[in-house]
Amino acid sequence: MDNVRAAQNPRVKPHETEPQNSQQKFLASSNDFVHIEKNLASLGFFTPSTKKIKGSKKKTILFSKEVDGKKVELRAVILPSAEYGLPITADQDKFLALQKIIADIRYQKGMVNNPIGFTSAELLRILGLKVNAGKNYSDILEWAKRMTLTGISSEGVVYLAGKQVWASDTFHVFERFVSFGKEMPDGTIADKNYIWLSEWQLENINSNHLLPIDLETYKQLKNHISKALVPLLQIWLYATRAGGCFEKRYHDLCQILNIRQYPNLSRIKEKLAPSLEELKSYGYLANWKIEKTSSGANYKIALYHGEKFHRDQRRRLAQCGPGLEKKAPVETLQDNDHLISSEVHSSLLEEMVKRGVGEATAGDLLRNCTPGQPILDQLEWGDSLIRQAPRGKFYNPAGLYIHLVRENLILPESFESSQKRRLREALQQAREDEESHRLRLELAYSDYKKELIDRHIQRNFSKEHMRSWAQSKRLELLEQDKRLKDRWNEQTLQVLAENKVRSDIAKRLSIMTFPEFCKREQRKQQRAITDGGAVQSPTLLENSL
DNA sequence: ATACGGACATACTATTGTCG
DNA sequence: CGACAATAGTATGTCCGTAT
């Protein structure tokens, strides 16, 4: 494996080792991107260091961010646990590997739910580490503990995509961690490691607030600073992609990375050059410079967008489009068995023209679409993309629609098209119908029971008899539990006693059970239908859901 | 196959020192 | 001030053996 340090001379510059064997190349291209949760990436949660950082009490990061056009100062404090210290680059590696496991779960099930189970060996294989080394296993345990115990106290830095708000809160990354062989909350023994992601993580993962990272290239990086920079660069470069250059103050960079701030240029270069050169050799950066700020008092780092950044951007767009994920096709209501009928054809054509697509192009698209393609859904997805995007992002909306339809992009599950909404509403309606039907049946059943008991009492017992029976029942009840007298008033007690008598009587009668009653009602209804009578109560939605 | 402890090797980092 | 070398401490990882 290439990141086995012993196997490779670290002094050799990465680009000299780049010609890889074909197998590695294949891996790199087949695995594509791992999506990691955006907040941790942008926070600088992981500190580049090889050593454990136990001494520091906290790591504070100051941000300034544009929120609704206003510049807002935001603050995040990362609070390490005394025992395990700050999360470092090695933790980021494992975290990325976990994200890969999570992504796989998400791909298979469509949703991620707590807890997330994985074996240590699984994680080690993703990282390319030996699965038979005890040290590696204990490292994973320590990592999970560190992630669970490190707190983030933020003031508007963490974004909750589900609720669409910036959180000012204090929380952990992992809510809970149970390692192999320990007891689970339900009392069973864990057959592998289980992690409970904190709610905000889960929410953001499920609502696609994610950042793509090329794990294969990432794994080849040797320098810790460059590893820590990868997710940060992804955000910074994306924000400045139009300019082609990104500048960060040396002071701020040191703060985010938690590295020592040196006063002399030579020292700064000495520390940063190997990492920045490494990033450059992998194409993340085209170039980098360290310059004095305009005031002359401080230094700033200028980073130029590398070829890999543009390439990845294009690859992702070609794969899935903005914010979309490659997924199993979403089931749609459209017919799959025949090509578009002329009626549907003309209505779709109209929809496209309405959105500014030329009639000729629209016709072309419809002719070349795949059978069953959810074109209307794709158009609506385009609508929502344009609605959500900042003004001026899509200067050519028609182009987006054409792209969405031509590439037959798969919609994210979180997006609800009008078709899907109708289906969901119908489902909900059916559920409500069923619910009300069940309630009606229950009501009818209790009426049926009451009537049966009433009739029995009327036939067999006198009123006096009933009264004395209730009286003795009341005394019996009080005998059983003396506290009843304090808790309930005379009237409630009386009702309780009467009910008790009735239930005693009910036991002697042969009364249908609820399921039997339901069956009888159903039979009654069927007879009514076959007899041609009007249906009074709603039909039972048998196994329809 | 997975988990893990111990022995061992090594490469990374910060620090300090030296020299022009 | 800049560049480089030596040094120490330790994080990181492998190999091997053993248990489940």
Image (cartoon, coloured by chain):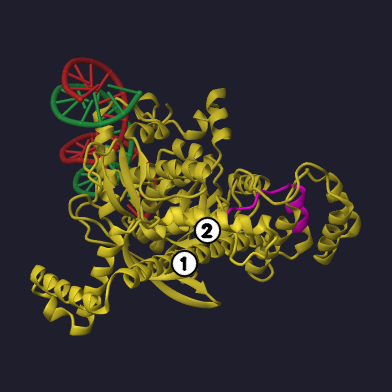
Chain colours: A yellow, B green, C red
Q: Residue at x 12, y 79 (%)?
A: A485
Give the amino acid at mark 2: Glu
In this view, C11 is above or below A457:
above
Work out whether mark 2 precedes mark 1 in sequence or the reverse, and give the earlier one. Answer: 1
Q: In this view of the protein, can residue A244 be seen by the observer?
A: no
Work out whether disc 2 and disc 1 sit on a shared chain.
yes
Instruction: Specify few, some or many for label 2: CA neighbours under 10 Å numbering under 14, 14-19, or 20 or more.
Output: some
Residue at which label 2 appears: A521
Instruction: Specify few, some or many for label 1: CA neighbours under 10 Å numbering under 14, 14-19, or 20 or more.
Output: some
Decide which of A334, A495 is in the foreground and name it. A495
Give the amino acid at mark 1: Ala
Residue at which label 1 appears: A444
Which residues lie in the magenta part?
A400-413
Q: Residue at x 61, y 55 (%)?
A: A526
Label 2–label 1 contact, CB within 8 A: yes
In this view, A256 is above or below A369:
below
Q: Quick one: SS at disc 1?
A: helix
Chain containing mark 1: A
Chain containing mark 2: A
Q: Position of residue A285 (x, y in %)?
A: 55, 48
Q: CA distance from mark 2 to mark 1?
A: 10 Å
